[in-house]
Amino acid sequence: MLSAQDWQILQTSFGIAFGAVLWASPFAVAAAYALSRPGWRGKSVLDALAHLPLVLPPVLIGFLLLLTFGRRGPIGHWLDESFGLRLAFTAEGAALATAVMIFPLMVRAIRLAMEATDARLLHAAAVLRADPWDRFWSVALPLAAPGVLAGAATAFAAALGEFGAVITFAANIPGETQTLPLAIYAALQQPGGEAAALRLAGLSFACAIAGLAAAEALQAWARKRRAG
């Protein structure tokens, strides 16, 4: 039986994961579309940058975000002075840190979906004098929609397990930035906290399995749709 605190942690985790998917989605779609197009100068650089969070330590990602979006960082200072917006040590900052970490997963899933699209459809749209913007919105994105949804579901499941970048950039604040992984870590730091950690670990495992199952179902639907 989950306690009120457990429900609070779960609500925080879902809110931050959902916010991370919203943060990452438009940039992931744009990057995936660019990378799915035939060779162009600078494509390899964009590909490397898009996948950089996969190879950098999450703590380093959080530290770089702190340097950039912290109150003394160039962007963070500007946001604070201009709009009174602070990201460091907030739920919004936790969502941003998580978005950076899940970005490569979304890019890969969406890129594969776009590369599987029949290129002749885009060529036909070009012949009909549709500009690149129209071809993206009317052809590429609708056809890749199942891949976008599958990528979002996978990224959401991964976001629920993000730890290093979040604790570095947003700290471990109960009721604000304390997600499931951070709550498990906090429970293990307390004497006799193993039972609470085990309960939260089971909850985290169940959420991850549900997210991956949803992603697999969406991918199966996409394959069936492409097959006709």
Image: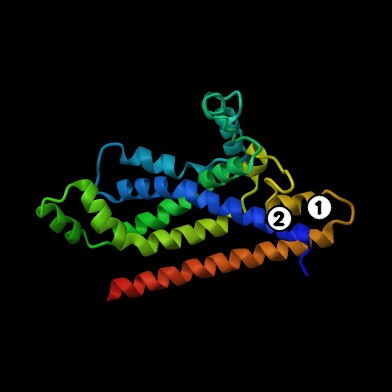
Task: Examine the rendered structure and indicate whether residue 81 appears above or below residue 100.
Answer: above
Apparent side of residue 71 relative to residue 113 in the rendered image (left or right) = right
x, y percent for residue 38: 24, 48
Residue at the (55%, 42%) spot, across then down: 96
Of tags 2 and 1, which is closer to the observer? 2
The mark found on residue 63 in the picture is: none
- Mark 1: few/some/many CA within 10 Å (<14, 14-19, 20+): some
The residue to which callout 1 is attached is: 188
Residue 160 seen = no
Q: Which residue is mark 2?
A: 9
Residue 23 at x, y percent in the picture: 48, 46
Q: Residue furthest right?
A: 191
What's the residue type where badge 1 is placed?
Answer: Leu
CA neighbours of label 2 inside 10 A, class few (<14), some (14 to 19), many (20+): many
Q: Is residue 110 left or right of residue 152?
A: left
Quarter of the figure with residue 58: top right
Q: Quadrant of the N terminus?
A: bottom right
Kind of element beneath mark 2: helix
Residue 120 seen in the current view: yes
Q: Position of residue 135 (x, y in %)?
A: 22, 52
Above or below residue 90? Residue 38 is: below
